[in-house]
């Protein structure tokens, strides 16, 4: 039987699997245990992406497209999966996908494949060299394994001219780089793949991904030690934010955390950890005590080495643009922060952005709160809703009936809570938030209710619902319970989700803010792109006009869009803003429009000035914020704008 | 002919003076740059490739293995691996992408350097016409 025939025999189920796989967005949530369901045993054991649910899904697509032909390794890959179902629980929580079905289809495909047709892959000199460094098992040139890295470091249109290597320590990383240089082979590190996957469908992939060469998968650098006495942690490059946060919590400490599946070291390098806790805990080099880095010559250095040139400063200006890291961070000693017994969440609802922004900056400058942010209605809806449809209805109810368009979210101790409550007329507290999480399905059905219609006719519906007796009616109407929320999941998973939602942390907004397991719901079978940056807060109109520019661009290019969040930095002197565009990553036309937005919004931001765009932000995380943010340049000149455009044309050619 | 051989440099001088328009292609630029090409196979040595341009006319193209050309104080020093320069010359990677991906490093005024990216790409596509053995 030829391979083509094999695909034909399996056509229906395999095609179905491909359709599921296409909706995957490489969020990486299947690689750590965020629901206490366990984590894919095959992935943990073998490491390479092809052994993880996320990689299997990509592999199925790559086999279907014919970019990769089955190799003998594929037998090992499918045999390593016992169809235990952990991936279904995890993935369903975030994306409602069922990766196990895909794994099953892949198994069937391999079972029906003619054993004589498997491709043989031989070891070459480069692979031999890499294996000498990391051991036989941890380096490969197998096309099936390589293909599984597509869209999360490798582009989809290159030859599979790569090696994947999984070092175990800093010395091995150094040796790999020296070896790569000696053989003139490009290389690039990969951690959680969350930044790569968000960039992959867009023009940014050209700069971010690896066109050929050696992928250094850092997953095996798994050192994690908490030092409670110094409130620090030593974290290897393979550790995710979630894993660090979990260990820190055992010691009543908290790390500055962003995306749960992002690796800590990578997040430090890539963005300096953009987080709603940043005003209090810091940003960029504030995050760490020390870093161990390997530079592009393979030299190992530590930031703490007092004899080295200043590693904390970087060149100012818009030309300081880099889409790959200058160093590989293999280990970081990060700061941890105390958790207080009286921490709580206070949310202040707003119908308009200006008022929300004002309160946020005021709180930021006064140093109130531990975590501070304006969150958009869309964000709230995405995070709190267990399914995509519920999130849409949730959003509709907030917009059309409640006029709840933004909230200022404050995590704080009781003293700060009083300050916030004194400053505003009404707030949403932890108890109502809990009801909104457990009652999200019911809340979304209020779309057609008389109660909401009456409420929307109030002059100030927010006041009516959050400051008056209607609040209790709402809470009752939501009928919140773990059982009710679990009913929206597939039948066979309902019992599991009932238990999940019964856990106190699943409705604890402070925990959810710190562990950040909900934001990947933005990648629920669709992609998002979140340009933005940090802007000086001194000129409110300038800030709000900047946000409006992103909104106008979304309208003009007909892409679903919404503000994501704004969070203050450096005692409210700056605020980071993310503006989100949601799109179908399988539709090339909308991907082109997203690319245009990335480029145009950067150009417009540079013209407006006093902003550090996200593209200029990238790979500055290891420097001092004072070097990165001060001074924020004025708008670029006409001449510089022309140059910028011309350069983009040379990079992007006719693509946009 | 062999990349970076004397013969190659001679042909490069001829072909660029014949085919590149000082105004349209090289934008009447006046500058000098030295490419430091590292890790040349088989023994991993480096080669220094110096180019001077005056009013869009290439006045010098020199090659050296000792580093003495660094004394010429070129306005820009561009450093990268052999393979990266080959990719650029073959047109597989643009100069700017190489820069953004940290495959080449530039010393000198960045804004000014960026103004030469397009002329450099023209120069490279002209050099691409030489039948080169890498
Ligand atoms: C849903 C979602 C929400 C997000 N929210 C936030 C947020 O709130 N705040 C925020 O800061 N970011 C956020 N991000 C962006 C992303 O999580 C960060 O950029 C993060 O740093 C990526 O980490 P990763 O481990 O996934 O890195 P990868 O995607 O694997 O790699 C990102 C880049 O870093 C390089 N790299 C990887 N590891 C290392 C290393 N050890 N040393 C040097 N370079 C390395 C890679 O080569 C690549 O260029 C979000 C992304 C998603 C998808």
Image: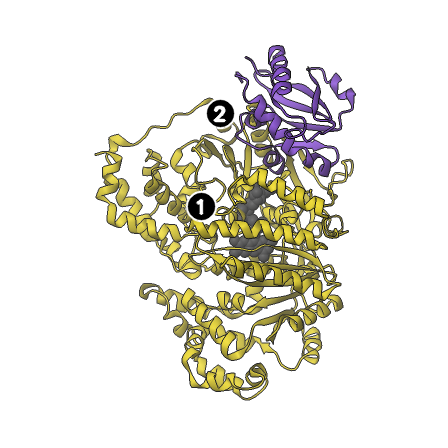
Chain colours: A yellow, B purple
- Residue B62 in the image: state x and y as whole percent: 69, 16
Give the letter of the chain under mark 1.
A
Q: Is residue A138 above or below residue A314?
A: above
Q: Is residue B121 above or below residue A442?
A: above
**Residue A354 appears left or right of A461:** right
Mark nearer the N terminus (1 vs 2): 1
Give the number of marks: 2
Q: Mark 2 packing: few (<14 Cα in 10 Å), some, or many (20+)?
A: some
Mark 1 element type = helix
- Residue A29 in the image: state x and y as whole percent: 47, 54
Would residue A432 be visible to someone looking at this image?
A: yes
The reply to whether callout 1 and callout 2 are in contact (CB within 8 Å) is no
Q: Mark 1 packing: few (<14 Cα in 10 Å), some, or many (20+)?
A: some
Residue occupied by mark 2: A126
From the image, state whether disc 1 or disc 2 is nearer to you: 2
Q: Which mark is residue A44?
A: 1
Q: Nearer the viewer, residue B68 or A78?
A: B68
Q: Tell me where residue A207 sits by quadrant.
A: top right
Would residue A28 be visible to someone looking at this image?
A: no
Q: Tell me where residue B116 sits by quadrant.
A: top right
Q: Nearer the viewer, residue A586 or A290?
A: A586
Report the quarter where the N terminus of chain A lies. Answer: top left
Give the letter of the chain under mark 2.
A
- Residue B33 in the image: state x and y as whole percent: 71, 26
Mark 2 element type = helix
- Residue A126 in the image: state x and y as whole percent: 49, 25
Q: CA distance from mark 1 to mark 2?
A: 26 Å
């Amino acid at each position: 039987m030829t391979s083509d025939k094999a695909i034909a025999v399996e056509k229906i189920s395999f095609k179905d699997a491909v359709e599921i796989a296409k909706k995957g967005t490489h969020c990486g949530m299947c690689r750590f245990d965020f629901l206490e369901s366990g984590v894919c045993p095959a992935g943990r054991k073998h490491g390479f992406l092809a052994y993880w649910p996320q990689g299997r899904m990509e592999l199925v697509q790559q086999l279907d497209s014919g970019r990769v032909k089955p190799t003998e390794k594929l037998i090992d890959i499918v045999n390593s999966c016992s169809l235990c179902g952990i991936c279904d629980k995890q993935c369903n929580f975030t994306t409602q996908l069922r990766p196990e079905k895909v794994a099953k289809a892949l198994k069937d495909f391999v079972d029906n494949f003619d054993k004589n047709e498997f491709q043989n892959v031989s070891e070459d000199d480069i692979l031999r060299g890499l294996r000498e460094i990391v051991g036989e098992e941890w380096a490969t040139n197998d096309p099936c394994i390589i293909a599984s890295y597509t869209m999360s470091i490798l582009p989809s249109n290159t030859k599979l001219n790569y090696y994947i290597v999984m070092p175990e320590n800093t010395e091995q990383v150094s040796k790999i780089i020296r070896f790569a240089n000696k053989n003139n082979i490009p290389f690039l590190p990969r951690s959680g793949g969350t930044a790569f996957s968000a960039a992959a469908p867009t023009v940014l992939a050209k700069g971010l991904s690896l066109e050929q060469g050696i992928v250094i998968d850092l997953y095996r650098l798994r050192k994690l030690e908490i030092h409670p006495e110094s409130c620090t942690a030593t974290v290897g490059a393979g550790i995710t934010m979630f894993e660090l946060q979990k260990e820190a919590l055992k010691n009543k400490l908290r790390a500055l955390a962003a995306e749960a599946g992002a690796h800590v070291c990578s997040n430090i390098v890539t963005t300096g950890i953009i987080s709603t806790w940043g005003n209090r805990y810091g940003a960029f080099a504030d995050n760490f005590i020390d870093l161990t880095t390997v530079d592009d010559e393979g030299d190992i250095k530590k930031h703490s080495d007092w004899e080295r040139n200043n590693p904390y400063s970087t060149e100012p200006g818009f030309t300081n643009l880099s889409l790959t890291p200058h160093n590989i961070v293999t280990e970081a000693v990060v700061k941890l922060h105390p958790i207080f017994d009286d921490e709580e969440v206070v949310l202040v609802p707003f119908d308009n952005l200006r008022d929300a922004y004002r309160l946020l900056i005021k709180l930021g400058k006064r140093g109130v709160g531990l975590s501070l942010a304006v969150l958009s209605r869309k964000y709230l809806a995405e995070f709190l809703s267990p399914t995509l449809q519920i999130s849409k209805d949730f959003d509709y109810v907030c917009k059309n009936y409640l006029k709840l368009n933004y909230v200022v979210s404050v995590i704080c101790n009781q003293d700060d809570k009083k300050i916030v409550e004194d400053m505003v007329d009404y707030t949403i507290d932890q108890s109502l938030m809990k009801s909104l999480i457990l009652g999200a399905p019911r809340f979304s059905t209020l779309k057609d209710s008389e109660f909401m219609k009456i409420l929307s006719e109030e002059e100030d519906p927010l006041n009516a619902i959050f400051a008056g007796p209607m609040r209790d009616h709402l809470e009752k109407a939501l009928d919140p319970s773990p059982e009710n929320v679990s009913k929206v999941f597939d039948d066979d998973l309902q019992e599991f989700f009932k238990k999940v939602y019964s856990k106190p942390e699943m409705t604890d907004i402070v925990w959810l803010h710190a562990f950040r397991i909900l934001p990947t719901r933005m990648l629920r079978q669709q992609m998002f792109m979140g340009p933005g940056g940090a802007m000086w807060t001194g000129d409110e109109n300038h800030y709000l006009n900047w946000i409006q520019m992103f909104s106008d661009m979304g309208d003009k290019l007909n892409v679903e869009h919404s503000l994501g969040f704004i969070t203050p930095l450096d005692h409210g002197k700056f605020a980071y803003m993310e503006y989100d565009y949601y799109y179908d990553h399988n539709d090339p036309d909308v991907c082109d429009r997203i690319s245009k937005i990335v480029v145009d919004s950067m150009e417009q931001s540079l013209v407006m000035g006093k902003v550090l765009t996200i593209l200029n932000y990238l790979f500055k995380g290891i420097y001092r914020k004072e070097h990165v943010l001060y001074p924020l340049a004025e708008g670029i000149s006409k001449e510089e704008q022309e140059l910028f455009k011309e350069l983009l044309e040379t990079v992007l050619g006719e693509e946009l | 002919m062999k990349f970076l051989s004397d013969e190659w440099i001679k042909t490069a001088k001829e072909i660029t003076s014949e085919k590149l328009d000082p105004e349209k292609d090289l934008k009447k630029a006046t500058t000098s740059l030295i490419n430091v090409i590292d890790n040349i196979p088989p023994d991993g040595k480096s080669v220094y490739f110096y180019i001077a341009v005056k009013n869009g006319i290439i006045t010098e193209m020199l090659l050296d293995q000792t580093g003495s050309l660094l004394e010429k104080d070129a306005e820009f020093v561009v450093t990268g691996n052999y393979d990266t320069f080959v990719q650029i010359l073959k047109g597989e990677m643009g100069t700017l992408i190489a820069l953004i991906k940290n495959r080449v490093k530039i010393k000198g005024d960045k804004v000014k350097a960026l103004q030469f990216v397009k002329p450099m790409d023209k120069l490279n596509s002209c050099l691409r016409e030489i039948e080169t053995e890498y």
